[in-house]
Amino acid sequence: MQDNDVVKPQKIKIHQPKHAGSERLSSRNRIYVRAVQGLYQTVRRRMGMVFMAAFMLLPWLQYNGQQAILFDLAEQKFNIFAISLWPQDLMLLAALFIIGAFALFFVTTFIGRVWCGYLCPQTVWTFIFIWFEEKLEGSRHQRMKLDQAPWSVNKIARKTAKHTCWILFSLYTSITFIGYFTPVDALFIDFFTLSAGWALSGWILFFTFCTYGNAGWMREIMCTHMCPYARFQSAMFDKDTFTVSYDVARGEKRGPRGRKQKPQDLGLGDCIDCNLCVQVCPTGIDIRNGLQYECINCGACIDACDGVMSKMNYKKGLISYTTEHELAGGKTHIFRGKLLGYALVLVTMMGLFAYELATRVPMDLDIIRDRGRLYKELFTGEMENAYTLKLLNKSQLTATFSVTTANLPNAKWKGDKQIQIKGGDVAVLPISLIADPYDLDQQITAFDFVVTANFSDGERVSMTQESRFVKR
């Protein structure tokens, strides 16, 4: 840099929310989301409906005579249709979380924050609550007018109906959610017959309040201020990540015009400055200000803008899912190091999870020794060792368990060798082994317990676990 070069100060435009904190909850400042139709909103609604239907119906499904999906924390058992996971399967649960995390990383790197815009429960429930608003209070303009109007019979009736629907839907959501952790049939009956305990009733009311507050009042505050994903998701973005973006080169300079007027003649770009993209945004941002962490990639502004472009006979795509490279006139690189790295880890973890699940033994054996008395010498001169075998049937089927020993020469068995255990139950089998000390070469002899389980569906599984026989 030469001594006579002058560095001119540049004014940096910083986008900040119009209202924040407690001011957002005021009816004068709250975001009134305008309904919009289009491709992406149709996809979002249908995906949301599938997600909602799955969430609401899955706890009520039965499989093998029991609740198909039940995360029973009291029994420390997770039932997912034919699969039962126990604390011994902690690695499988950890693998599931890792798969979920890297799936989110992969999707975010590829196409931005679409999880938030299409399937996040906060977004799905918020749009359901907005649907109640539209049906009971009217369009965006009508809702704004109703909130600003003085209290009247009409306003009280509409507000009461809306909040009643919100509370009832929140209550059903709460019961359904808790139904994933406790048998939903009994839960539903106990709550509405006032037979539920104080603790259970308290949890139901707590989650009802949370749903009502989050989807009815907090809404975008959850996405912009409380959700940690909104803060760190930009670290996964790069110049080839597809995000909702405004084409500045094509849209500027903004300004209104007639449908038959050519923007070139007026010195304008394609943006007619109608602000529909702001009105339909659930977080209330103006996408024309550039990429913002509040954007949840729901595509509502794309559908709104495409509708306006069609009416003006302009080319669609002024706002679109695109990349920074593409906006700059370059080429988008789909296959890149970061994305391939996430994909590799994701596929590897899914493969390992599938292998572990396929080779998982549906039973568990815990051998307990009496440490106060490791051996007992009989009057015959033989040595006796006592064991307590704790057998767990990790499947959902009844099985007959048979126990034998291996590598313990001429051992005599004292106790039951066979026991029937129902699916998900634990049985304790006390046994003793008697051996002649002259048949044993060492003071402590290693041997194996061999457990064979014959399940009611015909499957036969065996497992081996090592133990010790103490001679003296």
Image: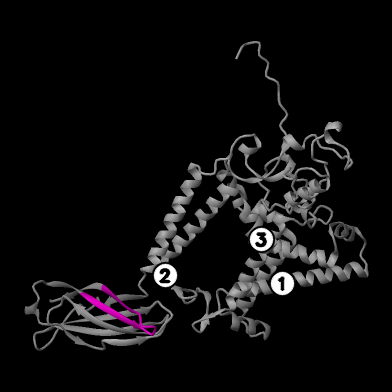
Asked if residue 134 lies left or right of residue 5, the reply is: right
Q: For the residue marked with disc 3, what is the amino acid?
A: Gln
Instruction: Using the numbered discs, state the Cα–Cα distance from disc 3 to disc 1 in whole angstroms.
Output: 14 Å
The part of the image, by quadrant, that contains residue 42 is: bottom right
Query: What sort of colour scheme is used for the picture?
Result: one colour
Q: For the residue marked with disc 2, what is the amino acid?
A: Pro
Q: Counting other residues with Cα less than 10 Å from the Cα at mark 3, is it few (<14), some (14-19), or many (20 or more)?
A: many
Tell me where the magenta segment starts and ends, as one range: 448-464
Q: Where is residue 182 drawn, in percent x and y?
A: 55, 77
Label 2, secondary structure: give it: helix
Instruction: Using the numbered discs, state the Cα–Cα distance from disc 2 to disc 3 in whole angstroms.
Output: 30 Å
Q: For the residue marked with disc 1, what is the amino acid?
A: Phe
Q: Where is residue 318 drawn, in percent x and y?
A: 74, 42
Q: Counting other residues with Cα less than 10 Å from the Cα at mark 2, is it few (<14), some (14-19), or many (20 or more)?
A: few
Q: Where is residue 373 drawn, in percent x and y?
A: 21, 79
Q: Which residue is mark 3?
A: 122
Q: Is residue 212 above or below residue 188?
A: above
Q: Nearer the viewer, residue 155 or 83?
A: 83
Residue at 85% over, 36% down: 262
Q: Which residue is mark 2?
A: 87
Q: Which residue is mark 1?
A: 169
Locate the C terminus by quadrant.
bottom left
